[in-house]
Amino acid sequence: MCNFENMKQLLIVLFISISATTMAQQTTAKTAWLEKWDNSKEYLIGIAEAMPEAYYEFKPTDRQMTFKEQLLHIKGNMDWLSTTYFSENEFKRTTEEQPKTKKEVIYLLELAFQKAYHIIETTNEVDFSIMVDFFAGPKSKIQILNLLQDHVSHHRGQLIVYLNLKEVEPPKFIGW
C-alpha cells in the first residue's frame, strides 16, 4: 500500500516531468522564426534548383531582374539585414565577380541562409525590442527580423512566376 508520503513524492515527480516537457516545447519568437527560416531556405533552394540553368538569365520584362539576379538580390538583402542589425560586424557590400553557374548561385544562397540563421540564433531575444535606425524610419529589431523573411517571400513569389512562364513546375510549398 502507498502511504501519503509516497503519494506526495509521486505527484511531485509527475508535476516536474510534465512541467519540464511543457517548457521544452515552448515556442518563442526566435525559435518560430528559425524554424520558418529553415523551411524558407528549403523552398527557395528548391525553386533555384527547379529552374534549368539555361533560364537563369531569363527576365519577363526589360525592367525586371533576371532569375539569377533575383536570387542574388535575395542573398544580398539577407547578408545586409542580418549583419547590420543583428551582429557587431560592419556590412560591406562586395563588388566581387558574380557567380557564373547555377551551382555557384545556389551555394552562395545556402551560405547566406546559414549565416543569417546563425546570427539570429545567437541574438538574445531581449534585443528584438531594441529600436534601430532604418532608411524607412526607426524600427524595432523584430520588425527587421520580419522584413528578412518578408523580403525572401516577396522575391520568391516573383521567381515562381518566372518558373511558370518557362513552364517549369514549382516545387511543393514548404511553409511553417
Image: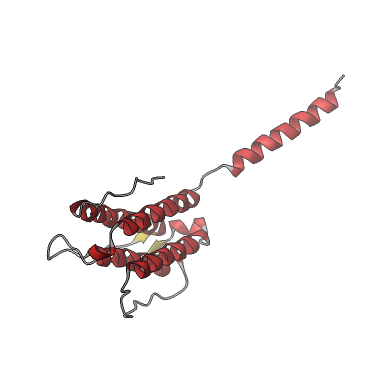
Residue 133 visible in image: no
Residue 172, picture quadrant: top left
Residue shown at the point (50%, 47%) measured from the top left? 28
Residue 58, picture quadrant: bottom left
Residue shown at the point (53%, 62%) measured from the top left? 122
Residue shown at the point (57%, 42%) measured from the top left? 25
Asked whether 36 or 10 is in front, the reply is 36
Q: Position of residue 84 (x, y in %)?
A: 40, 69
Q: Quadrant of the C terminus?
A: top left
Q: Is residue 12 above or below residue 161?
A: above
Q: Is residue 8 left or right of residue 157?
A: right
Asked whether 6 or 149 is in front, the reply is 149
Q: Quadrant of the N terminus?
A: top right
Q: Position of residue 44 (x, y in %)?
A: 35, 56
Asked whether 16 or 71 is in front, the reply is 71
Q: Position of residue 64 (x, y in %)?
A: 17, 63
| Color encoding of the figure | secondary structure
Q: Is residue 8 above or below residue 149?
A: above
Direction bottom: furthest residue: 96
Residue 137 visible in image: yes
Q: Is residue 122 left or right of residue 156?
A: right
